Image (spheres, rainbow, N blue to C red):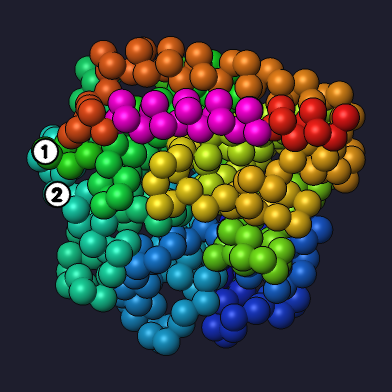
Amino acid sequence: MFLSIYVYRRLGLTLDLSQDLPVLPPAAIREGPAFERLTAEPERLRDPAQLRRWLTAFLPENGAIVPYREHALREWKRHRVGSERDSAASILWGNADAEYTGAIDFRQTTDAPDEALPPRGPAELETIGEREIGARLDLATRIADGAPRTRPEELLELPGRLSALSGMRGKLGLTQRDDGGWAVAHGDALNTWIVKHEQREGLAGEAGLEAICQRALGLVGIPAATTGARVFDGRQAVISERTDRAPRAGGGIDARHQEEWIQAACHRPDNKYDDGRCEGPQWPDACRLLRERANDPDAETARLTRVVAAAWMLGNGDLHRRNLGFLHSPAHSIPALMLAPLYDASSAAGTQYNKGLAVGMEGTTQADRVTPIRWLRHSNVCGIPPDITMAAIDGLFHLLPDALTTARAEARDVDQHLSRTAVEDRVEATIRHVQARERTYRQQQAGAE
């Protein structure tokens, strides 16, 4: 029972799963020729405990992992290898045909796996209508919210099982056809969009606001995934184009390797928010990684400063360690990293969810305590020149309100909402939040002089 892990279709690791152990012994881990391409810091994967956390990050969160366990159980029984296996490696072995984040493929192999997988075949697409998308979003949400209440046969009917998407909300992996319709990719094909069910009490208009915030970030020069709001048979959803997919020369879609921050650091995937203990990686750690691995370290660390500043200004408390990621260089280039375009950038301004920063700054997650002095300390520990940090903050304060207004106007003709009024109210609250943050910041700045 061997699990082989490929990156850019070349062999990176082979794991001997003959014994189902939570942490594999070193003798059960064998490196392949593409090992150095698997993750941002490959040396971490030589530590079996860190390898386990890296593998766990490929699996979905909450109840959405239950279909994977159900499918793996059937695979274990079919191969007569037992039914009690529950390690991340064993679940991935049982779902080796699924589509995962980045350019990673898993395969069930012998102890002598091929060093490369064949090129991806032609896309196999199943057209899916809006009513069926709505029904599948309902099922995905029920699974994410409480899979034990869902019948096992229903769990295995969900095509989203073939696309491991992290997060708290029910999601599907879909592909947009040339005519604007939707399809599900099968076989070795890759889906190109994430469709997320987004209807929550207390967050009316969230889908539309997220789409507008994502668009506004692009307008101020912060890369963000192409995002929109759609209604599928009465269900409000957010659609985001996958940034780990790229057109292939000659047609078709290839994967671009991408990792969540928490995975690149090989920390526990459920430790994505700061809870006062600072157990996960901090902003200086992200800066260190970019300085060591980016083609243009100064540009990437400056971009990270703008990303953190924009979240602070918008009231985005969801810039956590799974929403921030690193995009790896293409397969045939020198290994390097850059910040991946943002997902899930929104604003909790004016809602019960406006509770501060997901990852703290200089010992605090309270946005009101992020003063000019704290920004300077942050800049210092991250190794970023203070003038770069201060210029980024000044520039965003100047640009963000107008960018939100422009993004709202551009979205009116393309997005769909169950409540347009709620979206308009949330955008206005976000603009006021940015302006209020600037007033407080300027007062603190004047008081420190």
Magenta: predominant secondary structure element? Answer: helix
Instruction: Check disc 1 and report its element: helix, strand or loop.
Output: loop
| Residue segment shown in magenta | 423-440
Residue that appears at 55% across and 65% down: 270
For the residue pair 377 and 117, the one nearer the viewer reads as 377
The residue shown at (39%, 77%) is 76
Residue 428 shown in magenta: yes
Mark 2: give few (<14), some (14-19) or many (20+) Cα within 10 Å: some
**Residue 446, which numbered label?**
none
> Splitting the image into 4 quarters, where does residue 437 fall?
top right
Mark 1 residue type: Asp
Relative image position of residue 195 (x, y in whole percent): 32, 40
Residue 112 lies left or right of residue 314; in this view the side is right
Query: Mark 2 highlights which residue?
Result: 135
CB atoms at circles 1 and 2 under 8 Å apart? yes
If you read the primary sequence from the N terminus, does the residue marked by circle 1 or circle 2 appear first?
2
Residue 80 as seen in the image, left or right of residue 384: left
Label 1, label 2: how many angstroms apart (C-alpha)? 8 Å
Task: Give the residue number, with chain letter if any, for mark 1.
Answer: 233
